[in-house]
Image: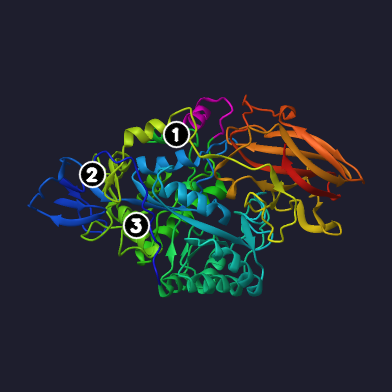
Amino acid sequence: MKKIVLLLIATLPLAAQSTIVIRGARVVDGTGAPAKMATVIVRGNRIEAVGENLAIPSGARVIDATGLTLIPGLFDLHTHLRASGALSPLVADWGKVLKTYLVSGVTTVNDYSSYGEMFEPMRRLMRTGVVLGPHVNLAVRVSPPGGHGAESGYGSMFTLEARTPEKAHEIMVEALSYKPDLIKIFTDGWRYGATPSLPSMNEETIAAIVEDAHKTNVKVMTHTLTLENAKITVRAGVDSLVHGIQDHNIDDEFIQLIKSKGTGYTATLAVYEPRNRTEMYPGLSRVLEPAIAQMFRSPQAAPAMGANGPRQERWNRLKYNDAKLFENQVLLGNGTDAGMAGTFHGWATLREIQLKTEAGLTPLQAITVATKNSARILGIDKTVGTIEPGKLADLVLIDGKPDEHIEDIYKTARVFLDGKECDLKGLEKEIKSEEPTKLPSHPVQALIDDFEKADGRTYLNTQIFNGDDPGSDHSNVVFTRIWRKAGDHALMVEATMGPREHPFSLLQIPLTPGAVELADISGFHGISFDVRGDGNYRLKALAYAVRTGGDFQAPFQAGPDWKTQKIDFSSLTRQGTPVTWTGKDVRMLQFELSGAPGSHQWMELDNLRFY
């Protein structure tokens, strides 16, 4: 099976030398061997030599690492780069999120918060150094209809859905067309016993997804929480679980099954740890941008995630199962679910390593899990994950002895990605800047869509998709092209409102592919479209500058006859923190349909353009 290809990302190199010598460090090479004093020579992006008394190449840049420990770059196999980790609603600045990993010594992460349309622009921005960060593996998400992962409100494009093997094969054609690095399946609908379980995925459907993914050399990771569903998932052939089992202590059947299959297991202790989510733990202040740090000073900050009876029982099982599997030589990985509330990017990866020691692993074993073992789960251990000649030079110098005192894992001193040293002070300064990460802004043409194209893409080369209110019983919206008259198409949108107080459905129209980069529409005065419907609607414009509060929006009405609706940008309003409309940072337009719970709403749309 082919391995995941690591992106080579520019990271603010401090020097242009092609050869670096790291001398005098205690080397913890990631293989599980104890620390040893050694010199490491890096030429280009590879480790050339590791040993004692090595000759220093002429012209090499020599780094005196006396008193420091050198370890391989760390892995986080479960992150959500587009979630901020804040305890209150805050749109993530994913450029700053990536920097938190580098300043924490994390050089490879798996992201489960993007969808296929986002992959190309995200990869391009990282590859060209516009956005700086570690190696990132992007995943397509798959869930059973109504399952966990499908209730976020982002729409069916964000999480593909399949209930049967036949449907799985169908959606995998779309999934694989985006060339994902990974597939993530939400196989388990258990909600910790706190709320009713959501649908889970059967073994045959999981196996169909695995079959198609493995044919194209793509690994499959799963959200799985319960023992019985874990057995189903492992039998289906997935590559790793990326949550730990919490409903029961594991049994011998599961241990033998997971060992026989060679499946990885990543417990994500950091997201489940009962702790005060607003306490400033060691190393945490280093990675918090101002918008998140502010909440630690807010009187509305969330209370501690207390260790009540059921939660404490789940936590005890989670730690027990992690240690029991390690004891039985099951391949453990390091992952956190970072981005979830209180699970802060970068720092949580280090916390996860520390929590492994609380579960029973030694510090050296926990470091091995976060380096070599995690690389093995991804199938890239022949390329990275240990400090050996020929491996990629993803390296971290730590001011201390984390293999003996795990608390030292937070003392990241220097980081090397692909043989280039990262400017940690510069990265920290950018994280703590009040300014957002700068993203490209592109002027766009006036015509967005007249719905004459049969491929479903707009004239801006973007994919329209649905959205809805979040929750398991959310509203549903579908749309399709219809005849407005002979030779002239329009878009029909139809929604069924869910059983909640203020249900809504969305037609979402990105202005750049995946709404990753920004559209500059400042040269226009407003938005014009032909519309027919039965009621009140709302147009929203999502701006990059808006991170909390509501989006820029304006209401409009439609009746049984077609009419041309014009909405001037000056009429757009929003609630929340003050943000000035510039028109230079718009990512997406949304048409919102709303109504009474259970009601049916519709709208027809044509000739959408800026004027």
Q: Is residue 291 magenta?
A: yes
- x, y (%) of residue 247? 55, 59
Which one is earlier in the sequence, the residue at label 2 or at label 3? 3
Which one is earlier in the sequence, the residue at label 1 or at label 2? 1
Residue, disc 3: 369
Q: Are marks 2 and 3 in contact (CB under 8 Å)?
A: no
Which one is earlier in the sequence, the residue at label 3 or at label 1? 1
**From mark 2 to mark 3, how far is it between C-alphas?**
17 Å
231 sits to left or right of 376: right
Give the extent of the magenta segment. 289-303
Q: Are marks 1 and 2 in contact (CB under 8 Å)?
A: no
- x, y (%) of residue 413? 27, 38
Residue, disc 1: 288
* Mark 2 surroundings: few (<14), some (14-19) or many (≥20) residues within 10 A: many
324 sits to left or right of 112: left
- Which residue corresponds to the image point at 79% horizontal and 36% vertical from the top-left? 566
Q: Nearer the viewer, residue 303 or 597?
A: 597
Position of the C terminus by quadrant: top right
Q: Work out whether 302 lies above or below 83.
A: above
Residue, disc 2: 401
- Which residue corresponds to the image point at 57% horizontal and 54% vertical from the top-left? 117
Badge 3 amino acid: Val
Q: Work out whether 349 lies above or below 157.
A: above
Q: Nearer the viewer, residue 308 or 195?
A: 195
- x, y (%) of residue 470? 69, 47
Q: Work out whether 68 lies above or below 584.
A: below
Q: Work out whether 126 lies above or below 243.
A: above
- x, y (%) of residue 398? 26, 42
Badge 1 amino acid: Leu
As helix, strand or loop, the secondary structure at mark 2 comes to loop
As helix, strand or loop, the secondary structure at mark 3 comes to helix
Position of the N terminus by quadrant: bottom left
